[in-house]
Image (spheres, rainbow, N blue to C red):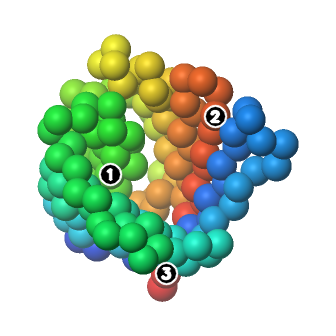
Amino acid sequence: MAGLAIVPERRATFQETRRFAALDQPLISTGHLLYRRPSYLAKTTDWPQPESLVVDGGRLVLTEGNAPPRVLDLGGIPELRTLVDAIRGPLAGDLTALRRAFTVTATGDAGGWILDLMPLDARAARLLQRAQVSGRETEVTTVRLVQANGDEQQMKIRPLS
């Protein structure tokens, strides 16, 4: 976690696969990620349709296509904050923040590690069953979110050099 915490900015591409019980085929999207210490995260989806999700501190701004942006205060939506923290916490290398929101189990070593995150908040657990974040050295390479209803999304992350 200390190695993750010293990286001031991360830029990466992603491919996200979402599996829903109601659909027989997964939904796949691609785009770019930008993380800046201490709490800025931008996820820009390029394909199949444009979407922007920006988290800056406790504020989330979601823009879909040409629609006007929706602004949400994460402080008022703890379930959503837990989802954001599952991604932002490991990128920040902030074990203290992760332990406030999750039961954290870490396995592996610098060459290949996995963080299993189980939400502590009962409301968050009704949405997110678990998050699994994996990587190597100071890079996060995969984020897997399993929702309480069984739906799942997995984001493969490739750092830009």
Dot 2 lies on which element? loop
What is the CA distance from the residue labelled 2 to the residue labelled 1?
21 Å
Residue 21 image-quadrant placement: top right
Instruction: Characterize the local packing of mark 2: few (<14), some (14-19) or many (20 or more) Cα atoms within 10 angstroms.
Output: some
- The amino acid marked with disc number 3 is Leu
Judged by depth in the image, the label closer to the viewer, 2 or 1, is 2
Earlier-in-chain disc, 2 versus 1: 1
The answer to whether 110 appears left or right of 9 in the picture is right
Q: Which residue is mark 1?
A: 88
**Residue 2 horizontal/vertical position (percent):** 27, 51
**x then y, percent, for residue 9:** 28, 73
**Front position among marks 2 and 3:** 2
Answer whether labels 2 and 3 touch (C-beta < 8 Å): no
Q: Position of residue 87 (x, y in %)?
A: 39, 49
Along the line of sight, which residue is nearer the eye, 70 or 129? 70
Report the mark closest to the observer, 3 or 1: 1
Relative height, residue 3 to residue 106 (above, below): below
Q: Does residue 69 appear to the left or right of 33 in the view shown?
A: left
Q: In the drawing, what numbered circle is on residue 160?
A: 3
Picture residue at 71% right of the left edge, 55% below the top: 27
Q: Position of residue 158 (x, y in %)?
A: 56, 70
Q: Is residue 3 visible?
A: no
Above or below, 21 relative to 92 = above
Q: Residues within 10 Å of mark 3 (few under 14, many from 20)?
A: few
Residue occupying image coordinates x 38% and y 40%:
83
Q: What is the CA distance from the residue labelled 2 to the residue labelled 3? A: 29 Å
Amino acid type of the residue that numbered disc 1 sits on in the rendered structure = Arg
Residue farthest to the top? Answer: 122
Residue at x-position 58% and y-position 55%? 155
From the image, tell me which residue sits under label 2: 151
Could you tell which of marks 2 and 3 lies nearer the N-terminus?
2
